[in-house]
Amino acid sequence: MVSDEDLLNAQLQLAKMEGIYVEVSSAASIAAAKKLVDDNIISPDERIVCVVTSGGLKDPEASRKALPKLNPIDPVWEKFIQVINFTGRME
């Protein structure tokens, strides 16, 4: 079992680390995997698959309080690139 707090933390970590915004309930497999590692049931070196089934925009209100406040930017491509600190080249 994982708590609501575990779910929100997993949702936030998945967004921060992978750029994937999932619905809170969809983060359950991520939260459970973390708990299994923390409880030494599985090794951090094991390769596992966690399925996430629903995007965060399905129910954004469920996690709005737990997620950091976003500051809107001007809808200009150059500003977007500056904000994400994109250093690659897009063709």
Image (cartoon, rainbow, N blue to C red):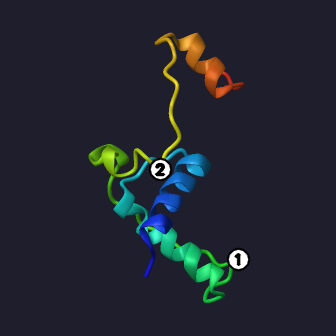
Q: Is 81 on the left-hand or right-hand side of 3?
A: right
Q: Residues within 10 Å of mark 1 (few under 14, many from 20)?
A: few
Residue designated by label 2: 66
For the residues marked 2 and 1, what is the alpha-carbon distance in whole angstroms? Answer: 29 Å
37 shown above or below 7: below
User: Is the residue under label 1 in contact with that under label 2 (CB below 8 Å)?
Assistant: no
The type of residue carrying mark 1 is Asp
The type of residue carrying mark 2 is Ala
Q: Could you tell me if residue 91 is visible in this image? A: no
Q: Which mark is residue 45?
A: 1
Q: Which mark is residue 83?
A: none
Q: Residue 61 location, x and y as percent?
A: 32, 45
Q: Residue 2 location, x and y as percent?
A: 45, 76
Q: Residues within 10 Å of mark 2 (few under 14, many from 20)?
A: few
- Of residues 18 and 36, the one nearer the viewer is 36
SS label for mark 2 = loop
* N-term mark: 2 or 1: 1
Q: Residue 59 location, x and y as percent?
A: 28, 48
49 shown above or below 40: above
